[in-house]
Image (cartoon, helix red, strand yellow):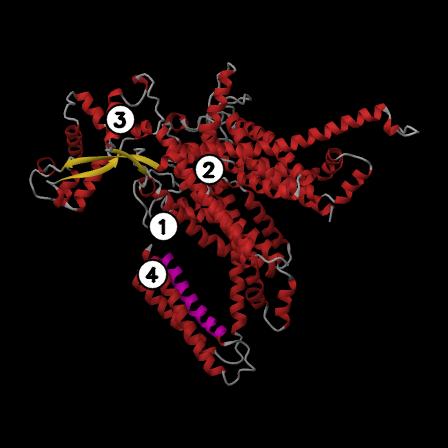
Amino acid sequence: MSSSPSIHASERALKRLKKRHARERRFKVMGLSAIAIAVMALIWLLYSVIGTGYKAFYTHSFTLDVEMTESVLDPTGARDPDALRKSNYRRIVQNAMYERFPDVTDRKAKKELFDIISTSGAPNHLRQMAYNDPSIIGQSFTITVPTSDDVDQLLKGNIDRDLDESRRKVSDRQIAWVDQLMETGEIKSGFNKGFFVNPDSRDAELAGIATAFLGSLMTLFVTALMAIPVGIGAAIWLDEFAPRNRFVDFIEININNLAAVPSIIFGVLGLAIFINFFGLPRSIPIVGGLVLGLRALPTVIIATRATLMAVPQSIRDGALSIGASHVQAVFHHKLPHAGPGILTGSIIAMAQALGETAPLLMIGMVAFLTEVPNSPTDPATVLPVQIYIWSSNAERAWVEKTSAAIMILLLVLILINGFAIWLRNRLEKRW
Amino acid sequence: MNSILILICVTLALTAISFVFARQKARRQLAVAAKTIHSQPSYHGWFAGLMSGGLAFLALIVSAFLSLSPLFTIVLMVVLAVLGFFFAMNRIGADFRARTYVEYFIKSILVLCSLIAVFTTIGIIFSLLFESMRFFKEVSFLDFVTGLDWSAQTAFRDDQVGQSGSFGAVPIFAGTFLITLIAVSIAAPIGLMIAIFLSEYASVRAKRIIKPTIEILAGIPTIVYGFFALLTFGPFIRGFAESMGFGIPTQSAFTAGVVMGIMIIPFVSSLSNDVINAVPQSMRDGSYALGATKSETMTKVVFAGALPGIIGAFLLAISRAIGETMIVVLAAGGAANLTANPFESVSTVTFQIVTLLTGDLEFDSPKTLSAFALGLMLFVVTLLLNMIALIIVRRYSAKYE
């Protein structure tokens, strides 16, 4: 091509260039594969959670004719509420089941038959009904109660029917009954409302996230009440009023460090100060909220400072020049402009607090609770801790529940963060 | 609890009433001299409100400390509030500097807010030190940091309390180190490559998609990672090893470390991205002008310039990994083995704190106290790492300004 071959066109140089270009391509591929690994990890994680969790949103229930036999429940006929509480509702359910399958006679088969239904859920349902309205004793009616978690798993296809009977949780006989009941429509699948309204339970088919969800809400309320005002106040002081000296430098460094302290340390602090020193009760949302409030404080301060710094100095100066005091200039003029940014930062800090587990374990929010909390001073747990508690159960039904609870948690986090981003895009000013 | 709420409401009500009356009086009285007054009527109102409310609150605190009866407390609060109210009402006038006082109060509240962050740090140090000292009275510090045998759980039995050797934390530190090493050796290269790709290769549009997607990883709560490690990744690794003919446990340093590494990828990538972007474009342009390819520019020019910042990012990532709790609690296994084999069950500082401090606590037993000693170690190490990282990053960013 060219008349004078330059050294850049020599064979060696071209070879070298080829090598260099290959290296360039390899480098780019490395970058791309790093992204691919991270994205694939994310997809795998979400897939494994959603793939098992979605099944917990529907469940199977059994519609059964029961007779509230008076001779079993209230032989004296006194209708005493306390006595009715202790009556043998289990027997009623058993009788109803035996009546549905009159040809089952032998003891073992009878037990298996009863095990199709939620063995504590059904009697508890009847107990609650009788407690609410004692006049139903002696009557017959139909109730719809959850099936046992094993039957639910069988119908969801999670138990291998081809496995040897001794190695699966439901017997051949139970499978036959369940199939028959499915055909007649007595066992039906439907939306799992119990998962949302029930507190925790030892039985997978009855366990729900109500306690944890309300606990999370209350805890987060206390956290917000504490961290957001204090955080904004601290940020305003540091940004506007603080003198420049060593002590203020120390406060700033301290806040930056506090943001990077492991969250479990805040739990230890809460245990030592709030519970051991002040003697507050364990496992209550107030203490949990305070601990998470301290945890979220540096995040709120840092986010607020960043927004305050972005507001042009001229706004404050304008206010000062027409005679406003320093406090007025900041609160009436600077702060409103920073409002949207502060709100976004605070919301994101609250989302982080919602996902915290370790500090709340330290202050005892890990108790097994079968009651829904009514106020922030009642023992409660939170969603992440509920997930932790459930995750120690290896049975399929529990894995499903845990995954579903994670789905709820992630959904709430996505909504909160999405709201924050929407707010920022909508309200934030660029100067 | 409820009585306190009621008393706080009483305080607020007294504040509000004082505010309204004082403002009204100030409005009437100062309307004549509207141009020469120092403070607007509402500041007079605030002054009165703060005087009466503040005194009532003071009475509330005092009676809470002396545990007086609620009725007496209310009487005391109202009397003091009325005194404060009349004090403020008497001051209302054109010359009275109500605004100055109110603003002084506001600033004091702001200072108090800032001090809460300091008090938190002091609280952490104090509570950890205090309980650790009690622990080190029973177990010598030297035994704690050099002992090779950790069996805090069994030391609960009477005949074993304080027995030397039970609280040797070396296996715990080794386990923490092993998991951190695995996590960082996953997160550091991947995070760094992502940062490089985003800053040097990705188009604006690609960046807009990739960046938030990676950030999602950072927003997922750690308990979710722990659950994923325990139920998906652990069994997957075991199955994979079995198919190769090895038998390894589901819960191991490897399982926890890899999942933790994935968790801190966005942490490394966003910090490194910032420092790489901070390297001046002129340095890149100079390199391109000499004929260097993008990768050569990156590895030989930009990387060298960004190195301190990247080291800072790695240090922060290490600090994150050391303090991470839920993943190790669920997936590390928890046996205090002194091992370098990643496929064995190990225990970490955070794991031990969780197991020692959940359940029934006895603040006298070294078992409980040892958790505070571990907490102190954790706090000191992460604090040092953060400090060093901050200093490095700060110095580095000053270099290019």
Q: In the shown orientation, is residue A104 left or right of residue A149?
A: left
- The mark closer to the camera, 3 or 1, is 3
Numbered circle sitting on residue A376:
1
Q: Amino acid at mark 1?
A: Pro
Q: CA distance from mark 3 to mark 1?
A: 46 Å
Q: Is residue B394 left or right of residue B223?
A: right
Secondary structure at badge 3 equals helix
- Amino acid residing under circle 2: Arg
- The mark lying in front, picked from 3 and 2, is 3
Question: Over which residues does the magenta segment extend?
Answer: B42-67
Q: Nearer the viewer, mark 3 or mark 4?
A: 3
**Do badges 2 and 4 share one subunit?**
yes
A159 or A372, nearer to the observer: A159
**Mark 1 and mark 2, same subunit?**
no
Q: Is residue B58 located in the magenta-colored stretch of the structure?
A: yes
Q: Amino acid at mark 3?
A: Asp
Q: Nearer the viewer, residue B126 or B311?
A: B311
C-alpha distance separating marks 1 and 4: 16 Å
Q: Position of residue B378 (x, y in %)?
A: 53, 36
> Residue B349 at what x, y percent from top left?
50, 32
Quarter-wise, where is residue A103 in the image? top left
Q: Is residue B364 visible?
A: no
Label 1 vs label 2, nearer the camera? 1
Q: Amino acid at mark 4?
A: Ile
Query: Same chain for the residues at labels 3 and 1, yes or no?
Result: yes
Q: Nearer the viewer, residue B50 or B282?
A: B282
Helix, strand or loop at mark 1: loop
Residue occupied by mark 3? A179
Name the subunit of mark 2: B
